[in-house]
Image (cartoon, helix red, strand yellow):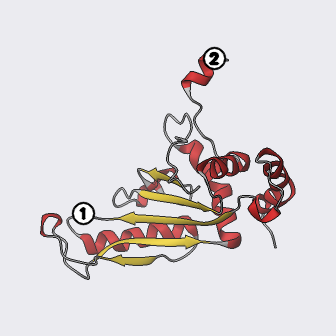
Amino acid sequence: MKTTMQKYYEETVFEALKKELSLSNPHEVPALEKIVVTTHCGKATDRKQAVEDSVEEIAKITGQKPSVSYAKKSVANFKVREGEAVGARVTLRGNTMWEFLDRFIHVTAPNIRDFRGISPKSFDGKGNYAVGIPDQSIFPEVELDKIKRDIGFDLIFVTSAATDDGGRALLRALGMPFRENKQEEGAA
């Protein structure tokens, strides 16, 4: 069964992007491929417990159990040994991805304190977008009185767009609350 966000993409956004980007081939129209949620527990004194807390929080937020990331090599300055657990990550695809995107756009992002929009500058040159979330308390799935430590997240929206403009157009059409430039507001 398709989610409401997926139906919205297929029925409305797909054709609008095809016209906006002047694409003749329907396979060139940008699409959202996956969302990757990652966290790193580098500064925690009790890193093992911090990773367990991160896994628990990401599982609540995404509805999918994350995998644990391990250090590839030892770094003395960061007090990290090879093979030590340092973070967690989960990749969302399909219905889970669309549901998470819908919740992020309509519920979570507006919960950010002093929210004025998300920066439109965090594209990687290939149409993928990354946004950092400083703590997990903005997610409605997290119970505030049960938070043991603040855990920051990185959300990476991987698109099939070849350029940043295509990825930006896709996410803007899906409803991503990008911040408007002050120069554009002053000119209007």
Task: Pick the residue in front: 22 or 130.
Answer: 22
Q: Which mark is residue 31?
A: none
Task: Pick the residue in front: 100 or 175.
Answer: 175
Q: Quadrant of the C terminus?
A: top right
Q: Position of residue 58 (x, y in %)?
A: 48, 67
Task: Pick the residue in front: 122 or 36.
Answer: 122
Q: Nearer the N terminus, badge 1 or badge 2?
A: 1
**Seen in the image, is 74 located left or right of residue 101?**
left
Taking the spot 81% from the left edge, 56% from the top edge, the residue there is: 14
Q: Quadrant of the N terminus?
A: bottom right
Taking the spot 45% from the left edge, 51% from the top edge, the residue there is: 133
Q: Position of residue 103 (x, y in %)?
A: 65, 56
Is residue 30 placed above or below 87 in the rendered structure? Answer: above
Q: Position of residue 148 (x, y in %)?
A: 35, 61
Whether residue 71 is visible here, answered yes or no, is: yes
**Seen in the image, is 130 located left or right of residue 180?**
left
Dot 2 falls on a residue whose secondary structure is helix
Local packing at callout 2 (Cα closer than 10 Å; few below 14, some 14-19, many 20+) is few
**Seen in the image, is 47 located left or right of residue 64?**
left
Taking the spot 43% from the left edge, 58% from the top edge, the residue there is: 153
Taking the spot 69% from the left edge, 51% from the top edge, the residue there is: 170
The amino acid type found where label 2 is placed reads: Ala
Whether residue 142 is visible here, answered yes or no, is: no
The amino acid type found where label 1 is placed reads: Ala
- Circles 1 and 2: CB atoms closer than 8 Å: no
Task: Pick the residue in front: 55 or 24.
Answer: 24
Q: Which mark is residue 44?
A: 1
| Residue underneath mark 2 | 187
User: What whole-number distance in Å separates the C-alpha atoms at marks 1 and 2?
Assistant: 46 Å
The image quarter in which residue 28 lies: bottom right
Q: Position of residue 31 (x, y in %)?
A: 71, 61
